[in-house]
């Protein structure tokens, strides 16, 4: 292992945990796709092979990004932001619709799709981190400091919310946390939060008043998820997915049913993604579910440790944003499966089947490793300089 890690720069622990989860995802995806075979046809092996292609692409992307100099990553943030807007606009008008939501771009000549919001999330985190550094001395001014930072957040979240409310809400909340970390005054954060809530309320009123415009095409879906969650005892049919997820966790007991022996996964439409945690607990049990939680916590701890160690504000903000984002995704998936949150579309980073989410999660880790490697080189050079000075 050490021999191979010499080619992978940065934090070895992050590399090991990420690669272990990506490798393990091949086992679980193969085990969790029976429902997909029933619905869309094909064989478990065909879905495994497709996921394997995504795993390879994700690793290559992670490796290439981690070799990029951090200053070049910083320079590309604005380009990435505008590219994200272009992709979201293209998806809005020409996106492929799945389950009533047009979130995907079909890649020409191959039967693969890419969810543009996955790229937009990372692009926004990078751009906001860069703006926080650039505007750090102007954060007391609405015109020169706050508005230039808030505009990209509102634009990206506004383009995502139409077909993916949960992602837009999570991204906005994450952006607010990043602004708080970047020392934006709390009063201004509260004012912006109230303003956004007011704007959302206005859009909702317009949708209800002018239904023919269909401003929020997935409004009924959002409403049903919340109302069904609130009246779960009265809506067993509507809550079948959530109830089956809780039953799967119950069936898992302490050591699980065994790989491939889970039964409830065959009744969970997104057993390999949105309900990944429930399927995992059913087959591997609560013990390994605890190991999974610990794995994510160690990964996030290593990311936060680096973020606090570097004296580069852009790298620190970006690392914290990525770490909180990965932890939020995993936490939401677990909370949905356990019935704490209403059903929403957040999968498990590095483990669930989903090409664009996996690739962008790995690109995020590649960025972290690029920063970590630069810090390691800097510390090594300083140690060498100090040793020579002592002689």
Image: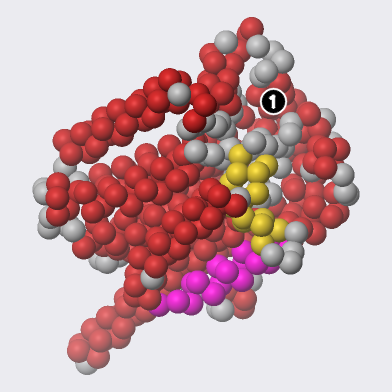
Q: Residue at x 50, y 72 (%)?
A: 65
In the image, residue 254 above or below residue 326: above
Task: Give how far across and how far down residue 139 sits, in percent.
Answer: 15, 51
Vertical order, 276 against 15 (above or below) = above
Report the number of discs.
Answer: 1
Secondary structure state at the residue bearing disc 1: helix
Name the colouring of the figure: secondary structure
Residue 347 appears left or right of 133: right
Q: Which span of residues is magenta-colored?
A: 53-69
Q: Residue at x 74, y 66 (%)?
A: 109
Front-lying residue, 70 or 379: 70
Q: Nearer the viewer, residue 108 or 18?
A: 108
Q: Is residue 346 magenta?
A: no
Q: Position of residue 154 (x, y in %)?
A: 34, 45
Majority secondary structure in the magenta region: helix
Q: Nearer the viewer, residue 14 or 194?
A: 194
Q: Quadrant of residue 19?
A: bottom right
On the rendered image, what quadrant is the C terminus found in? bottom left
Q: Which residue is mark 1?
A: 241
Local crowd size for mark 1, using a 10 Å CA cut-off: few (<14), some (14–19), many (≥20): many
Judge whether residue 67 is colored magenta: yes
């Amino acid at each position: 292992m050490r021999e191979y890690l010499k080619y992978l720069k940065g934090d070895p622990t992050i590399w090991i945990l990420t690669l272990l989860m990506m490798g393990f995802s091949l086992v679980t995806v193969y085990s969790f796709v029976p429902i997909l075979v029933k619905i869309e046809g094909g064989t478990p092996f065909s879905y495994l092979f497709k996921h394997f292609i995504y795993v390879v692409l994700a690793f290559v992307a992670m490796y290439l990004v981690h070799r990029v100099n951090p200053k070049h990553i910083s320079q590309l943030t604005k380009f990435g932001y505008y590219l994200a807007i272009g992709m979201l606009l293209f998806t809005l008008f020409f996106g492929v619709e799945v389950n009533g939501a047009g979130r995907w771009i079909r890649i020409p000549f191959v039967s693969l799709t890419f969810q543009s919001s996955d790229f937009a999330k990372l692009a926004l985190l990078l751009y906001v981190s860069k703006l926080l550094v650039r505007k750090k001395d102007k954060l007391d001014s609405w015109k020169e400091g706050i508005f230039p930072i808030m505009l990209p957040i509102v634009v990206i979240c506004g383009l995502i919310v139409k077909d993916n409310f949960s992602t837009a809400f999570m991204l906005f909340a994450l952006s607010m946390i990043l602004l708080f970390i970047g020392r934006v005054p709390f009063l201004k954060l509260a004012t912006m939060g109230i303003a956004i809530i007011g704007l959302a309320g206005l859009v909702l009123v317009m949708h209800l008043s002018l239904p023919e415009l269909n401003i929020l095409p997935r409004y009924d879906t959002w409403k049903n998820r919340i109302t069904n969650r609130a009246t779960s005892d009265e809506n067993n049919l509507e809550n079948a997915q959530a109830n089956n997820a809780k039953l799967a966790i119950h069936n898992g007991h302490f050591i699980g049913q065994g790989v491939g022996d889970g039964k409830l996964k065959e009744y969970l439409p997104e057993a390999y993604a949105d309900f990944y945690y429930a399927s995992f607990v059913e087959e591997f049990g609560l013990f390994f579910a605890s190991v999974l939680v610990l794995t994510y916590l160690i990964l996030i701890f290593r990311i936060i440790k680096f973020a606090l160690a570097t004296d580069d504000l852009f790298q620190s903000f970006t690392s914290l944003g990525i770490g909180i984002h990965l932890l939020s995704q995993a936490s939401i998936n677990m909370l949905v499966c356990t019935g704490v949150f209403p059903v929403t579309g957040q999968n498990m980073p590095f483990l669930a089947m989903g090409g664009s989410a996996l690739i962008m999660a790995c690109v995020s880790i590649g960025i972290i490793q690029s920063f970590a490697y630069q810090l390691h080189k800097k510390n090594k050079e300083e140690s060498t300089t100090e040793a020579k000075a002592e002689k």
